[in-house]
Image (spheres, rainbow, N blue to C red):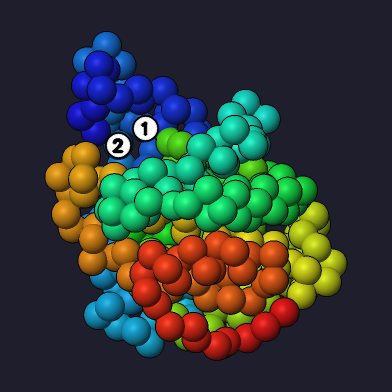
Amino acid sequence: MDAPPDKEDCRPFIEVAALLGAAAINVPRVLAQDLQQGFLLLTDLGGRTYLDALRQEPDSAGTLYGAAIAALVRMQQHAACTTLPHYDRTRLLREMEMLPEWYIARHRGFELSERQRAGLSACFEALLANNLAQARGFVHRDYHSRNLMVCDGAAGQGDNPGVLDFQDAVQGPLTYDLASLLKDAYIEWQEERVLDWSIGYWEAARKAGLPVASDFGLFYRDFEWMGLQRHLKVLGIFARLHHRDGKDQYLADLPLVMRHARKTCERYGALLPLLRILDTVEKADLKTGYTF
């Protein structure tokens, strides 16, 4: 890793790598470090991401997601997080506020009315109340198909999945990483599969003693509302990457993230003001799906 100290701080990566390694998660091991120059010597987890494998071999999804869910439960059960920052109200709200600033205003060129701003604020508050009330633990924060590596145990790589990009880990809601994984910005699955995988996680989490909701319906609502917070953030981030940083490749992923967001809003009456705003901005037609 070459991370110039004036641009990157390697210390969070080193700290979280140690926490995850102690929890038997397959992460790069730090063999040597020179923090003054920003160099780390790391073990190699190969070059094949989950996203590559899933696109090339869709039939591998059951095996790969089963391994990713098992690793997530182990991570939440055993990775210490008391030294990590809190995923608090300020951070969660700041992330959602990128939606009106970067996606709605800058990317779509749409100016919200005062009534729409009030409706958006009310929905943000509803999401925050749910997110902050959820059981908390270790949160990777970007646990998805581009940060999970296919490892076959060869060359000392370890088992699936190899886990990368964990340096922004926090203490936060337990549903966050599952939402990152199953409502991925880069690959889409039928809702029946998402439900099946969610049930598999919920059952494994309860067996492991994690404090998830005892009723699956309540758990799935928490999962969806946490996912919506992330979708709104990602819409803003991808728009900002395009307009501020000139990284146009993320534009192709915006429609999937918007579908995730709108599908969740369609289910819950408290989120209808947000759905109406998104409909106006996107000029989208309403669609149907499962309801809870």
Inspect this view and state whether residue 189 appears. Answer: yes
Q: Which quadrant does the N terminus fall into?
A: top left
Q: CA distance from mark 2 to mark 1?
A: 5 Å
Q: The residue under label 1 is which amino acid type? A: Val
Give how far across and how far down residue 142 sits, in percent: 44, 51
Q: Nearer the viewer, residue 289 or 117?
A: 117
Give how far across and how far down residue 45 sits, in percent: 31, 52
Quickly name the residue at label 1: 30
Quickly name the residue at label 2: 42
Q: Is residue 243 left or right of residue 50?
A: left
Mark 1 and mark 2 in contact (Cβ < 8 Å)? yes
Q: Is residue 149 left or right of residue 264?
A: left
Q: Which mark is residue 193?
A: none
Instruction: Examine the image and state in which quarter residue 59 appears.
Output: bottom left
Mark with earlier residue (2, 1): 1
Mark 2 nearby-residue class (10 Å; few <14, some 14–19, many ≥20)? some
Give how far across and how far down residue 244 sits, in percent: 21, 39
Question: Is 126 situated above or below 30?
Answer: below
Instruction: Examine the image and state in which quarter residue 74 appears.
Output: bottom right
Q: Residue at x 29, y 65 (%)?
A: 253
Q: Is residue 231 left or right of residue 123?
A: left
